[in-house]
Image: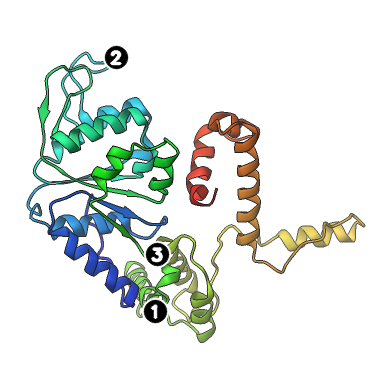
Amino acid sequence: MGNLPEALGVSEAFLDFQQRLSAVAKIDRPVLLIGERGTGKELAAARLHFLSQRWQGPLVALNCAALSESVLESELFGHEAGAFTGAVKRREGRFEAADGGTLFLDEIGLVSMTVQEKILRAVEYGVFQRVGGSSSVKVNARIVGATNADLSEMSRGGKFKSDLLDRLSFDVIYLPPLRARREDVEYLALHFASGMARELEMASVPEFSAGALESLQAYDWPGNVRELKNVIERSVYRSGGGKIRKIEFDPFVNPYADEDVSRKADKGEEVEEADLSQPLHAQVKALELRLLRKALMESGYKQQDAANRLGLTYYQFRALYRKYKDEL
C-alpha cells in the first residue's frame, strides 16, 4: 500500500474512531470499514494492520471496483498456467500474497456474487482454488473490507451474500466524515498548507485570512479529507507565498461564463433564469441524481442501458453511480 501518511485530527469524533480501530486491531477477526469517499479507509486499514499481531506480515490491498469479474477473480486467487489466454505460468493472487498478514479489499460492495462465493470459502475455511486449478490452497489472511455502500440493504435485496456479510462483520466501524469533525478542518488545513509550502520551497507557510478560515468551516466537504487536501494545496500554490484570502472550492468554475452571459444579453438573446439561492455544486449534484435515478428506473436498473440513455460510456456511468450510490 506504499508509504501512507498518518491520519491526523484532534476532534472527539476522530479520536473516538481511532480508539475503536486500536481496540479491534488486536482481535484477529475480519472488520468492515464503512465511510464516504475521501474519509481515509485505506489509512484506517493500515492502522488496523500495524496495530495487530500480524504487523510483521504483509499488508496487501486490492480495489475491487477497478476490475472486471474475471480479472478480479484472478487477482484475488491467482491462476494456473493455461487457465486462460495469456496465462503462460502460474501466478499467485492477493490472498496468497497476504498469507500471515492482512488483505484489504476496498469497494467490496461491488464484488459479483460469484466472486463473493469464493471469498466466503476462503474466509470461512482458509482454502481456495486458483483459477483453472483443482487443488486447494491454504491461506491465513485477515480480511479488512471497505465500502461506502449499505451492505445490509444489499444483502436484503439479494445483491450481497448474507453468509459473507456475517463473516466479514465481526465489527463494523464507520469513518466520520469531515463535516462531523469540524474542529479538524483548520488543523488539517494548516498541516496540508505546511506540506505544500515545503514542496514549493516557500520561505514561509502562507497565512489564511479570517474570511478564508470561515469559508473552510462553512463548507460541507462532500469529498472529505481528500477534497480538503486538494483545495488547500491549490490555494497555497496560487497564493504565490502571500496571504490566502479566498478559497476556491471548485476548480472547474469557468471564469469566462459571465462574459458569455453578458455577450448574449448584449445581442438581445434570451438568458435562462438562474437560481442562485443554492451553490453550484449542490445544484449540479441534484441534477445528476435526478437524471441517474430516471435512467436507472427506465432501464430496469440495467447499468449498461442506463449509461446509454445518459450518453455515457459504461465506465463513466460506473464512476457516477459509485459517487451517488448511497443516495439512490
**The residue positioned farthest toward the right in the image shown:** 268
Residue 130 is situated, as x and y percent measured from the top left of the image, at: 19, 24
Residue of label 1? 183
**Circles 1 and 2: CB atoms closer than 8 Å:** no
Could you tell which of marks 3 and 1 lies nearer the N-terminus?
Answer: 1
Please, what secondary structure does the residue beneath circle 2 have? loop
Three-letter amino acid code at disc 2? Thr
Q: Residues within 10 Å of mark 3 (few under 14, many from 20)?
A: many
Please, what secondary structure does the residue beneath circle 1 have? helix
Three-letter amino acid code at disc 3? Val
Figure quadrant of residue 93: top left
Residue of label 2? 85
In-image side of 224 versus 195 (left or right): right
**The residue positioned farthest toward the bottom in the image shown:** 210
Three-letter amino acid code at disc 1? Glu
52 or 124: nearer the viewer = 124
269 or 164: nearer the viewer = 164
Could you tell which of marks 1 and 2 lies nearer the N-terminus?
Answer: 2
Identify the mark at residue 225; answer none if there is no mark.
3
Q: Residues within 10 Å of mark 2 (few under 14, many from 20)?
A: few
